[in-house]
Amino acid sequence: ETGVTQSPTHLIKTRGQQVTLRCSSQSGHNTVSWYQQALGQGPQFIFQYYREEENGRGNFPPRFSGLQFPNYSSELNVNALELDDSALYLCASSLGGFSYEQYFGPGTRLTVT
Amino acid sequence: ILNVEQSPQSLHVQEGDSTNFTCSFPSSNFYALHWYRWETAKSPEALFVMTLNGDEKKKGRISATLNTKEGYSYLYIKGSQPEDSATYLCAFSGILTGGGNKLTFGTGTQLKVEL
């Protein structure tokens, strides 16, 4: 196992609601990246946090937002949920800068009804 | 838009067969190419990170090659075992998109090894 944990494992929300997903990074890692994997697709990069600052964002609307805390754990918040937000959300931790290694958590499965 | 393509989409082989998959990626702006193995209900597991043209890496029965000039990588599994059944993902990272940390994934190759 990678040492990266995510909570909750599964959750079901209704369209229009808000959700917060959590990620604890591997010890010593200061960077967390979030990915969305919709059915039949590869994981898509949402954004990355490095030392509590957003450090790059993929093609996702502003209702996807995040935080990173001083212990380098992170949250992904999604407002005004849409049916298409149903997906597996993965976080990955790494050392910042141009490092190669990313270590993934097992993901949170979000279902929007 | 970066396109990372993987083929085949799925593969069924018999135990003991050798197999290989392909990942194609943009040949410009290259920084690194990653291979992950992902079993159902588990975390994606890093297999290889490859950075140099001509790189070849090996981990047990699994090996990978890299051609950055033409933009492709092959993953080989020798003597497939049922425990090799998983989805194999490749991911590209580019210099202009922040280096190693921001990955663009393919859709994966789903391997099923049957007894």
Image (cartoon, coloured by chain):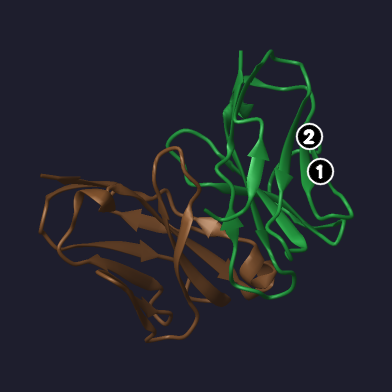
x, y percent for residue A37: 54, 40
x, y percent for residue A1: 52, 53
Q: Which residue is mark 2?
A: A77
Q: The chain shown in brown is which?
A: B
Q: Residue at x 77, y 17 (%)?
A: A17
In this image, B1 relative to A51: left or right? left
Callout 1 crowding tier (Cα within 10 Å): few <14, some 14–19, many ≥20: many
| Amino acid at the residue labelled 2 | Asn
Counting residues from the N terminus, which is met first, the one under dot 2 or under dot 1?
A: 1
Q: Is residue B110 visible?
A: no
- Image quadrant for the C terminus of chain A? top right
Q: Is residue A86 visible?
A: yes
C-alpha distance separating marks 2 and 1: 6 Å
x, y percent for residue B105: 50, 55
Q: Is residue A67 above or below residue B59?
A: above
In this image, A98 relative to B111: left or right? right
Q: Residue at x 52, y 65 (%)?
A: B92
Judged from the image, the secondary structure of the residue bearing numbered disc 1 is: strand
The mark tally for this picture is 2
Callout 2 crowding tier (Cα within 10 Å): few <14, some 14–19, many ≥20: some
Q: Residue at x 35, y 56 (%)?
A: B6
Dividing the picture into quadrants, the one containing residue A72 is: bottom right
| Amino acid at the residue labelled 1 | Gly
Q: Along the line of sight, which residue is nearer the eye, A80 or B112? A: B112
Q: Mark 1 falls within which chain?
A: A
x, y percent for residue B75: 30, 67
Q: Are marks 2 and 1 on the same chain?
A: yes
Q: Mark 2 falls within which chain?
A: A
Judged from the image, the secondary structure of the residue bearing numbered disc 2 is: strand
Q: The chain shown in green is which?
A: A
Q: Are marks 2 and 1 in contact (CB under 8 Å)?
A: yes
Q: Which residue is mark 1?
A: A66
